[in-house]
Image (spheres, rainbow, N blue to C red):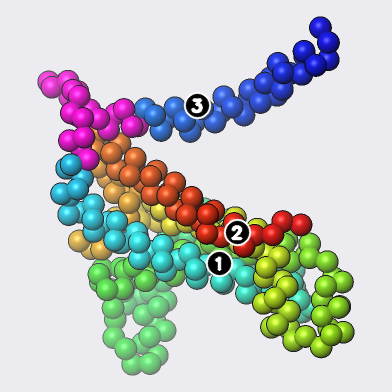
Amino acid sequence: MTTKTWSVPYGWLLLAPAAILLVGFTHYPAAATLVHSLFSTGTAVRPSRFVGLANYAALAHDPVFWQVLGNNFWFALGTIPASIALALLMAIWVNGKLPARALVRMSYFTPTVLPMIAVANLWLYFYTPQIGLLDKVTALFGAGSHNWLGDPHTVMGCLIAMTLWKEAGFFMIFYLAALQSLPPELEEAARVEGASRWYFFRRVSFPLLMPTTLFVLVNATINSFKLVDHLFILTKGGPDNASNLLLYYIYQVAFSFFDTAYASTLTMVLLLLLGAFAILQFQLIEKRVHYR
């Protein structure tokens, strides 16, 4: 055989391991979930049967689903922009010349490497009424004890604060790497021209950071819809579903209520939402992305 004849099967052989993993762990589970959402949940007495879109109709009339979806919207709105802005500020700060720069970088990144369960238990100590660190601080100003995780008005803010602490350091690493890859000649030329640091950042640095911003934005969006471990330790979705998020609700339906068909329906909604957000982000933001 000629080299050209061998190139096609050789290319497919190189792609085969990644393709098998992608199909086995992404496409096949998604297709199986879609099929399962069209059937009822089977039991030992009553076998599963085809119900078409009945599960989706039940979903449309499920008040808990709409409450959970609203919770997730506010959670995403509170975590995505704030985590990106905080990560960028931290990256700019640790990229400069400051004392103990390596220690500051390590301090910012440390929450990222902590296990999720450990993070949840750490913040549970902060939020515990009377003996928690937050109540101790507010008591210095004359405030009384407050059940931060048991109050529907404060529980979502508590989750958002914990998530920002956990994720901002992770996103900072990508921004720091991007900042260090920028040509230093650009800053020198801007300094010669008399441009301010804010003007240089707004017109030069930030546009060059757009590929990193797009990457971080997609990951922050995905992370805002996959919080489970922290909720299991801190609130279990309470009080009265005030902190329940979509993925945790799927977990509850599947493993607490044992309604796997309805859980599959909820999973398809989650996949569609993430897919729509990803398409929207790439369509709107990629026009502003300039790859060097």
Residue highlighted by disc 1 = 84
Amino acid type of the residue tagged 3 in the rendering: Gly
Q: Earlier in the sequence, mark 2 or mark 1?
A: 1
Badge number at residue 118? none
Amino acid type of the residue tagged 1 in the rendering: Ile
**For the point 20% across and 61% down, which residue is it?**
240
Badge number at residue 24? 3
**For the point 33% across and 44% down, which residue is it?**
269
Amino acid type of the residue tagged 2 in the rendering: Lys
Q: Which residues are magenta?
A: 33-56
Q: Nearer the viewer, residue 251 or 115?
A: 251
**For the point 50% across and 71% down, which residue is it?**
82
Task: Tell me if 168 is positioned left or right of 192 in this view.
Answer: left
**For the point 42% across and 76% down, which residue is it?**
133
Q: Position of residue 46 (x, y in %)?
A: 13, 22
Task: Tell me if 53 is positioned left or right of 45 in this view.
Answer: right
Q: CA distance from mark 3 to mark 1?
A: 32 Å
**Residue 117 visible at all:** no
Residue highlighted by disc 2 = 287
